[in-house]
Amino acid sequence: MIRTRFAPSPTGWLHIGSVRTALFSWLYAKNHGGEFLIRIDDTDTSRSTQEYTESIISALENLGLSSDKNIIYQSKRFEIYIDKIEELLNNNFAYYDEIEITEKTKGTDLNIQYDNRLNKPNHVIRFKNQKNKKIIVNDKIHGDINFDPKTFHDVVILRSNGIPTYNLTSVVDDIEFQISHIIRGDDHLSNTAVQINLFNALNPKIPEFAHLPMIHGKDGKRLSKRHGAVDIKYFLDEGYLSEAIINYLARTGWSHGDKEIFSMNELVKLFSLNKVTKSAAIFDYDKLNWLNQYYIKNNSIENIRKMIMPYLKDANITVKDEKYLEKILELGIEREFSLKKIAESLSYYFDENLSYDLELIKKFNTEKMINILDKSIAKFEKTDFSKKENLSNILKYISKELNLKFSEVGPVLRLALTGRLKSPSIDDLSFTLGSNKTLDRLNNFKTLILKLN
Ligand code: GLU
C-alpha cells in the first residue's frame, strides 16, 4: 500500500510552497490508490500554536487535501519517542553528551520542558551516526544522491530540555504509520542521510524519497514575503478558488504536455513524479490570477453568488435581492481576479449615496456636464427600462442631440452612476441599476455639481 504524509510544523501560517508539497504527496498517494496522512509536527511547544494548527488543517481541508486517517499530533506522542530513544541507548546507537556552554549557547534555555526518565541535567542524547558507509538515496526526482560519511554528524535526538528532535520523531512516526514514500521539499535533503541511518538503527524498511525542488520568485530567490503574499491563508481570504490554487500549484514544477487546465480528477489520473522538474519552479502571481479569473468566469453565477457573500459582508454590502446580485455579477465578474476584489468593485451598485471624488469632477467642464445630465434625465425619464436595447438606443440619441461624441457623454454618465470612470457599459449599468436608481444618481450628481459652482 502506498502511503504518503504531509508533516507541517504549526509555527506559522502555511506557506504556499508547503501546500504544493502537500498536494504532490496527496496526488501521488491517490494516483496509486493509496492513502495520504497529515501529521502535525508540534513538538516545539514554545513556538507551535493552536491557531496555526487549526488554520493549517482548515486550509488543507478547503483545498480537498484531507487526511485519510486521524491527524497525528506529535505533541501527544512524546512517551513513544522516549521509548524509542531508550531503545537506541540500549542498543548502543545513542549516547549522552554533556552540553558545552559556549559564547553561542550561553543563552539557551535549559529549563525542562518535557519531564521524562531519560533527562539528565546539562546533557543531550545524540544518535551515533554510522560513519563508514556512504549512503545512496535513489530519489524519485533527483535520481541517485550520494551522501559522504564525512558529512555525517551525531545529531541530537533528545534536547537537554527533554524534547525529542525532529529527525528522531519524524523517523519514529514514518515507521509506525508505515509511510511508503516521503515527499518533501529538498531543503530537507541534509536530514535524509541522518534519517536513513536512524531508520536502519530502528530496523525497519526504508521508505522511498522524493525531494521537491523549492519554489522561487521571478528573481530566482526562494519565494518569500519579499515577492508578495506567500501564506495560503492570504490566498483563501482573498477569494482564490480552491480549484484555481490546486491547478496552479500542480503546474508549478510539474507538467503534462502543454495542458494548462486540470480538474482534480484529471490530476489524480495524470500525476507522476517523473514529470516533476529537477530545478526550482517559479511562482508567477499573474498566472495564478489568470487561473482564478478563469475558474470564476467558468463557474455558475449561482455558485459565485453563494461564494461571494462573505466578501460582500466584509465590504459592508448588504444584499437584499439575490436576483439583483446575480445580474450585477454577470456584468462584474470578468473584471477582477478574486472574489474579494469583485466584492469591493461592486460596492457602487449597493451604495445609497455614492461618494464622488471632487478632484475627478474638476477635470470635467461644468456646463457640458450639466447639459449631458439634463438631457439624459429627460430622456431616461421617458424610457422603458425593461429592455436593455431601449437604453442603448437612448444613449445614442443623447449624444446625437447634444452634438457630442459618445466618448464625451460616456464618462460623465459613468461617473454619475458609479462614482468611477471604469465600469461596465452604460446601457448594461443602467439596465441593472433600474430606472429609480439611475435617475436618483443622475439627479444627485447634478445637485452636487450645481452646489460646487
Ligand atoms: N515538520 C517538517 C517541516 O515542516 C517536516 C519535514 C518532513 O516532511 O519530513 O519541514
Image (tube, rainbow, N blue to C red):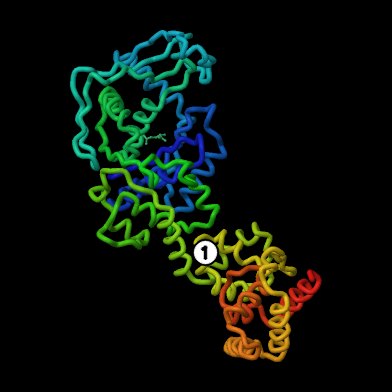
In front of the other: 245 or 53: 245
Q: Position of residue 72 (x, y in %)?
A: 44, 37
Is 371 situated above or below 63? below
Q: Nearer the viewer, residue 245 or 389?
A: 389
**Circle 1 — which element?**
loop
Q: Label 1 neighbourhood size at 10 Å, few (<14), some (14-19), many (20+)?
A: some
Image quadrant, ligand 1:
top left
Residue visible at 68% across and 69% down? 350
Q: Which amino acid does the dot numbered 1 rest on? A: Glu
Q: Position of residue 372 (x, y in %)?
A: 68, 82
Q: Within the image, what quadrant is residue 312 found in?
A: bottom right
The quadrant of the image that shows the C terminus is: bottom right
Residue located beneath label 1 in the image: 336
* Of residues 187 and 229, the one drawn nearer to the viewer in this rendering: 229
Residue 433 in the image: above or below residue 179: below
Q: Is residue 22 visible?
A: no
In this picture, residue 421 sits left or right of residue 291: right
* Farthest residue, direction right: 451
The residue that appears at 74% across and 68% down in the rendered structure is: 353
* Vertical order, 319 against 243 (above or below): below
**Screen quadrant of the N terminus:** top left
Residue at 76%, 74% (x, y): give it.
444
44 or 253, nearer to the observer: 253
Rendered residue at 45%/53% (across/down): 63
In the image, taking residue 316 as reference, residue 135 lies left or right, namely left
**Image height of 220 relative to 108, above or below:** below
Q: Residue 423 at what x, y percent from top left?
A: 58, 71
